[in-house]
Every structure is written in C-alpha cells, then in structure tokens.
Image (tube, rainbow, N blue to C red):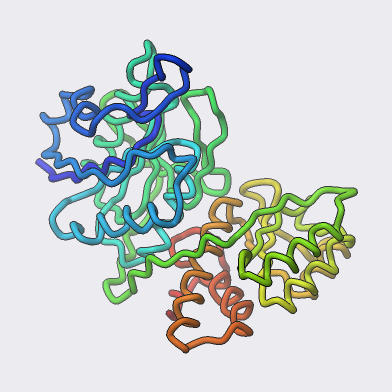
Amino acid sequence: MKKICLLFCGGTIAMVPDTKTGALKPALSPNELYALAPKIEKYADVDIVFVTDIDSTNMSVKEWQAMASAIKERIDSYDAFVLTHGTDTMAETACALALAFGRSLKKPVIITGAQASPVLLGSDAVVNMERAILTAINTTLPKVIISFHDHAFLGVRTRKQSERKLAAFHSPAVPPLAEHMGDAIHWLTGMQPNVEPAAMYLPFFSQKVITVSLHAASDAKLLIDSLFAASIEKHIRGLVWVSLGSGNVPEVHHPAINSANEQNIPIIVVSQFPGGKLNMAAYDAGLKALKLGVIPAGDMTPEAAEVKLKWALGLAEKQIAEGKMSEKQIIPFAREVFGHNRADEITLAESNPLPV
C-alpha cells in the first residue's frame, strides 16, 4: 500500500455555503474532508497535512512557497502527494510548484478540487478526491499533475475552461496524461520521468507581474504613464501581454516597449489562443515588437507565462539582493529563462536544463 501525503490547501472541495449570504467559504476541516471518502483508506496509507484554507482566489506567492516547502520537507517520506485546491487558480499553483522543483522533483504531485461544495447534491468533490488518490497510487511519474473529473493533465499545460461544467479543465497544447475509466486509470502518454537529482530547488517568486490583454483602440498613453509611475516604486517588475492573432502587438503599444526597456521591465508575449504557438514574424506589427525586445512565450498558456515570469523575477531579485546581478541584467536574464524548458511548460526545438 502506497504512502500518500494529502496536503490540505482549501478550495471549493472544502467549502460550504454561508447560512446568511449563500456565498461559499472555507468550513470543512482536513479530517472532515477526508471522511467524505472513507474508502480511500482501503487503497492508500494517507497522512493529512494542513497548509492553508484560503479561497484560491486569494492565493499569493507566500502560499506557493508554503506548498513547495511542505512537499520538499517530506519528499523522501511519501510515495506521492495530493493537494486539495480551489479551481480558480489551480493552474497557476501547478505551474508554480513545477517551476520551483524543475526536474529535481522526485515524486508525483497530484492537485485536485471541485466545482461544487461537497455538501451539495451532485457535487464532484468526493469522486475528484478519490480519482486524485487513484492517480497518485498508479504512477511514479515525478510531475505536477492536475487530476480533475475524468482526466489527468500535465499541470504546467492546463487551463480552467468552465465555471459550471464538471469537466472544468483542459490542456490545449498537449494531450491529457491519463483518462479515468470507472475504477481504473488509463495512461495515454509515454512521458519519461527524466529526473535530474542535481537540478536545483528554486522556490522564488516575485508578485510584481501584471498580465494585459491587448486590444484595438486601446489608450497606449495610459499604459506608458502607468508603467512609468509603477516603476518608480518598483511596483511592476514584469509584464505579460496577451497578443492578437499569431503574436501581433498593435503599433500603438510599441512605445510602451521602449519605455519598459528603459525601466528594465521584461515584456512576455503570449498567444490569445491557448495552445497556439506564436509566430511573431508573420505580420509586421508582431515583427516590429519582436525587434524592439519583447520575449515570445511560444506555446505556453497565459497562466504558465505569468507564473514563469514571476519565478524568473523572483530569482533575479534574489541575485540582485546578493549583489550577483544588476537591474540592467533583468531583461536578458528573463530572456534566457524563457529560452529554456524547466518543467515541460514550453515546446522548444532543443530543450536544455536552466543553467541556474
């Protein structure tokens, strides 16, 4: 029987409606949550560790680091880890944990949650919990995996696609890892473990990243003025731009690229079509932006691009504080980070371990 560490990190799977407002709020204790699925004890030896019970909407880098630390401290004591989590930011947490460990992760980390509170008729909470455990005991793949409804996905490639449907997640750029079929799990890919024990555990993140969707007829001056004001107090360290089409950046925003360059603020450009690979050279508007210095995110999801930039800037801030990097090196450093595949978050022609 495999030994599983169940990390309690809140989410709808552990929420009940407020008696006055009807709004969901954290309520169930870790043991009450586990008691909802008593048959689990027949298949796995489970220990429960409390991390947080906040709504996932309120997740910050502090909670990401706490989750990563809880796993790191126990990595040699368990066969796998299962995290309960809210659905709104589940994809971001999956990316954060995957990037914190990189290819040094030695055990499977399975994240799950629910679309409906477990106290409601027809809730998916119990079945998702059981299937997450089923996933954990049927793989040794040392990856961060989202198990939800009838599929298991590579966490860094996953997005939430529905607020109401039980099949709330999908993986637009790569196929699912596995499919749940009754009381069994059918693995669909031959992904190799690819563990590198020498790889470094780097749980550093900066909160100072903003994602902006580009649109026609936007007020570009407002963006530039906001950049300038925020950079004075270092409120913004990096930007993610969700582009138009195949990677087009309206020329009205090109002056903002120059402004960001002057303030050492990297701009990552990601496709508005999740799973679509950027081709910023296809049109002049995209090519000009590329030449001005924006950093393309390839086929990464917007969630993965934002979390990876937060991770890159967290590393940069640490090195700046230690006197190992200057502010002027932030953009080249971010470009280097996005040119490497740390946790299968991006498809590259040639993927090398990140040299940090």
Front-most of 310 and 22? 22
Q: How far across and down, in percent of the image, does residue 293 sit?
A: 74, 74
Mark yes or no: residue 150 visible.
Answer: no
Q: Would residue 325 be found to the left or right of residue 279 on screen?
A: left
Say above or below: 144 vs 309: above
At a point 41% along the width and 19% down the height, the residue shown is 18
* Quarter where residue 33 is shown: top left
From the viewer's side, name the closer residue of 258 and 126.
258
Residue 72's x, y, as percent?
25, 61
Residue at point 56% right, 66% down? 348
Residue nearest the observer in this picture, 32 or 338 = 32
Q: Residue at x 73, y 65 (%)?
A: 227
Q: Considering depth in this image, is 174 or 233 the residue closer to the camera?
A: 233
Q: How many marks can you see?
A: 0
Seen in the picture, residue 258 relative to 154 is either above or below; the reply is below
Q: Is residue 161 above or below residue 141?
A: above
